[in-house]
Structure formats: C-alpha cells, structure tokens
Image (cartoon, helix red, strand yellow):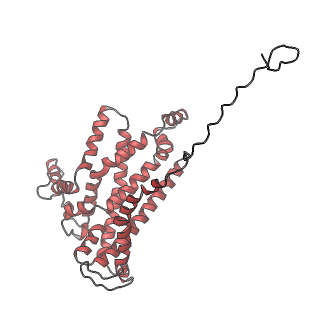
Amino acid sequence: MNTTPTKPGTGHSPPQPPAAAPHPPPRRGRRSSSTVSPLLYLFPVPALVLYAIFFAVPTFQAFQYAMTNWDGFSAAYDNVGLRNFERIATSDDLFRNALTNNLKFVLVVVVFQTLFALILAILLTVNTRGSVMLRALFFFPTILSSVSVAFIWKFMYDPNFGLINSVLETVGLDGLTGAFLGNPNQAIYWVAVTQVWFHAGQMMVIFIAGLQQVPKEMYEAAEVDGASRWGRFRHVTWPMIAPATAIVMAYTTIQSFKAFDLILGLGGNPPKQSMDILSTRIYAGFTNSEFGYAAAESIYFMVVIALITWAQRRIVRLTQAGAQ
C-alpha cells in the first residue's frame, strides 16, 4: 500500500531526498586525528642535547674564559675582567695585522669567487652533455683536501722551479715573474687566488640551481618588451637569484675566515705576518698557552663575521631592489 502524499491535480508523487545515513556511534577511546602524541615532542631532544653540548656550552665557556688569564692547563686562574678585550683593541699589533690581512683576503675572495661562479653558472645552465662534463671539471677542486690544494699551489708559486714562472719565462714574459708568496705585499692576494680556484666550482653549483628556477616566461616577456641581454639579466635574472647570491656570499665569507689549513699549507706554521689571518692568530694564542686571550680573540672573530655577513645581505637586498 503506497502511503506517499501526492501533489494535488497531478496524481504523481514528488521525488524525495535520500535519507541521511545514521552517524556511527563514537568509539570509546578513539583519538581525534588532530591530536598530537606527547611522545613526538621527545624526537628533537637528542639533537638539542648534542647542540647544547657541542655548541651552546662551549660558546658560553668562551665568554667565561675570555675574561681570565687561563693558560689552558692549570686548575687555577685569575679573573682579569675586560683586560683581554682592551689589549686586543688598543695594543695588539699582531691581531690588527691579521685582521687587515683577513679583510683583504675576504674582499678579494668574495668579489672574484662570486663573479666567476656566476659567469660559469650562466654559461653552463643548459643541461647538455658538454655542460655537465664542464660542471664536473670545475667542481673537481672542491673535493680535494685543503692540504693537497696548498701543496699543489705551493709548487706553482715556487720562485725557482714553480710552474707559473717557468711558463712566463717560456713565453718571454720574464718581467712578470716574481716571488709570489715570498712578496710580503702580495702574498695574501696569491693565497686568495688559490682560494677562488678551490671553491668557485662549488659556488657555481648553487648559482646553477638558482638560475634553473627562473621561469622562462619572464625572459620571453622581457624579450617582447624589447629588453636587451643586459636588461634581461639586470631586471629578471639578478632579482630572481637573490636567495642564491645571499647564500653564496655568506658561505664564501665564512669560508674565507676559516681558511686556516690553506694558510698553514702555503705559509707554514706559524705563517709569516704577510699571510697571518685571524684563525691562525687565534691558533697561535692557543699554542702559546694563552687560552683566555685566544678566547677573547675568538669573540672578536665572531663579531667581525656577523657584521660582514649582515652588511653583505643588506648590500645584496639594496642592489636587487634597485634592479627591479
């Protein structure tokens, strides 16, 4: 027997919406999908413990020892306050010489390594067989150890039987031969040349990754607008590779301040004053049992790196904002 009400005058019943399925009864003890287990908060604990042991605690201890005359071996030491910092800032000519050398070294390496890496990346961005082979060739020096690179270039710079002087004499350019690392006015720049050769291929890889992320449609639009090749680089490429440029410059700066093994390989231990940089000067403090004083030099070292890195990031942002 049909009990559905009919529409008056038609004799047909209207379509009825399907009945909603009944909700299943909630299961006792079942957790919501948004609930996070408290055990997940324990996963970062091993990393935090390692960070605290190997980074945070030594950093705080460096500040503590920087205000002492601790020699690194004795159980007792005296608190000298800020005397170590004052001595470094006012009367330490060796530290001032190392800082000057390091700034020259960083300036040359950052400028030329970034420039060469960017030029190589632009030339080798396309993924052809020849480009991949050349990328591997330019990247090869990066996998060598710093000591190996130092001894290779020490042979090339040798004034008596080095490769550079031999080649210059063979082609009749005897006037360009020189002592290279033996010249106190030029030694730090020749070390910078070695550093650029050592790591330009590594920075090239970062630039290639950044260049391959630039949409081709932007270049096509710039061409339609009549932009020249330099205009496309200035208004499209340069702003779009801002993150890659910032990474390359920051990494190159830190790398330049840490060129400890390269300096010792080229200049011996201890290096001559013409090749002494901050990391080798701090090492000399530790070897001379002046741990407290070397800790104060290390804090100056960190401050210099932080200031230069901050200034570089500001310069990159300003230049790329002006190019847009």
Looking at the image, which is closer to me, 285 or 3? Answer: 3
> Relative to 3, is 310 on the left or the right?
left
Answer yes or no: is residue 151 visible.
yes
Residue at 35% across, 56% down: 252
Whole-percent x, y for residue 178 in the image = 19, 59
Q: How far across and how far down the image is residue 64, in percent? A: 37, 77
The percent position of residue 209, horizontal first and vertical second, equals: 40, 42
**109 and 76: which one is in front?**
76
Q: Quadrant of the N terminus?
A: top right
Residue 186: tell me if it is visible: no
- Compared to residue 133, the image places residue 177 above or below, namely below
Residue 134 picture location, percent across and down: 28, 39
Task: Identify the residue at the far right of this view.
Answer: 9
Q: Residue at the far front: name it.
A: 1
Looking at the rendering, which quadrant does residue 45 occupy?
Answer: bottom left
Front one among 12 and 323: 12
Q: Pick the residue in front: 124 or 261.
A: 261
Task: Write the residue at 28% across / 55% down.
Answer: 195
Above or below, comparing residue 67 to residue 190 in the picture:
below
Q: Quadrant of residue 75?
A: bottom left
**How many marks do you count on the picture?**
0
Image vertical order of residue 185 relative to residue 8, above or below: below
Q: Is residue 82 left or right of residue 201?
A: right
Left or right? Give the position of 37 relative to 15.
left
Q: Residue at x 54, y 32 (%)?
A: 224
